[in-house]
Image: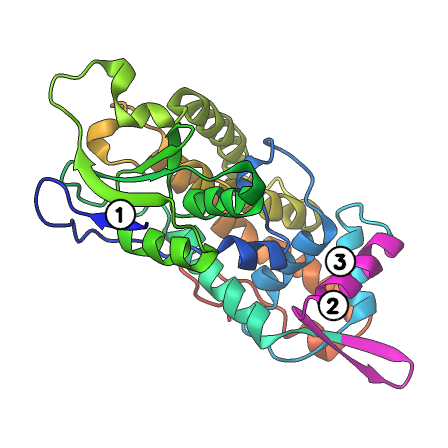
Amino acid sequence: MIGLATVDGARYAGLVVPRPSPSVVADTEFEDAEYRPFGAVLRPPRLLLTLLGDYWWQRTDSLPSAALVALLAEFGVSDSAARAALSRLTRNQLLVTSKNGRRTFVRLSDRAARILDEGASHIFSFGLHTQPWDGAWSLVAFSIPEHNRAARDALRKELRWLGFAPLYDGLWVSPRDHAGEVGGQLAELGITTATAFRATAIPGAGSEGLPQRAWDLDDLQKRYDGFIAYAEQLQERALAGRISPVEALVERTRVMDEWRAFPGLDPDLPAELLPDTWPRAAARELFISAYDLLGPVAVHRVRQIIARYSQDLAEEAAYHSSGLRPSS
């Protein structure tokens, strides 16, 4: 049966940043974003949603589909691939299309706008605050037979999105209090051979047995270091005014895409469990700086592209800062 237990005192009422469920992430073409290699090329549907979120944020007007195809061409996406992306997003009810004569127009659906708003809030707030920790861990132990493999895979995906990692094959851990969310997921998936509980590590345990061993912090630090090197040179070039509008559009999209992988990669472990020189804060500062610096230059290119099809709509394109404040 499902067990929800408390070990060593009351459950910890920690701050939890909500994450979209994996099913929502899959629908928005952002599935498995955290596992992409550094510098990987964005898939056209995901790229298009990113661009609409960055330059058509909270707009309800429809854009000519030809303008979106031209916008994707800036990233090397062919016309056929761009139109396939539009069709896929429309089928997934993330875009709404309409006709005016022979021209097709496209806008974000209300659902897509809501998902992008929630995602933006999570992306830009990640790493901003350090959450307190009481030393307790959330653990999920389960044994699911092979014939129920689909439920087992679904549970693992849900656990990763909640910030868990496998310490052993059937034992997943998180330093945050997610017992309630796990209980809901177990019930939803119909899994009855699992237990979620809270516990503390035994003092004096050897390093090989510590729960934080579930994460490869060395590999994550290398990825942060690579991002820092990239964002640092991007920031320097932006400050020196050595980035054209065409390049600014591409690089601003790339720095956003690289940064937004970290909330899925970084378990946001308490400071007590991290190396003294953990690079997340430096990486976040560089992301925010580069993203904000490139906004005014990148939106100039977006307006140029949309103006080929509608001058009035081109003037509506805008960028928002990392603080989610729209430009004037």
Q: Quadrant of residue 131?
A: top left
Q: Position of residue 145 (x, y in %)?
A: 50, 38
Q: Quadrant of residue 297?
A: bottom right
The residue depicted at 91 percent of the width and 81 percent of the height is 102
Residue 163 visible within the image:
yes
Observer-side mark, 3 or 1, equals 1
160 falls in the magenta region: no
Give the class, few, some or many, for how many residues have Cα within 10 Å of label 1's Cα (few <14, many ≥20).
few
Residue 327 visible within the image:
no
Q: Position of residue 147 (x, y in %)?
A: 57, 41
Q: Who comes first in sequence, dot 3 or dot 1?
A: 3
Residue indicated by mark 1: 129
**In this orientation, which residue lies closer to the viewer: 79 or 210?**
210
The residue depicted at 33 percent of the width and 23 percent of the height is 213
Q: Who comes first in sequence, dot 2 or dot 1?
A: 2
Residue indicated by mark 3: 71
The residue depicted at 60 percent of the width and 31 percent of the height is 37
**In this orientation, which residue lies closer to the viewer: 240 or 25?**
25
**Residue type pointed to by label 1:** His
86 falls in the magenta region: yes
Q: Which residue in the rendered view is the most extreme toward the right?
A: 102
**Residue type pointed to by label 3:** Leu
Q: Who comes first in sequence, dot 3 or dot 2?
A: 3
Query: What is the spatial separation of the Cα atoms under label 3 and label 2, in whole angstroms?
Result: 21 Å
Tell whether label 1 touches label 2 (CB within 8 Å): no
**Residue type pointed to by label 2:** Arg
Residue indicated by mark 2: 91
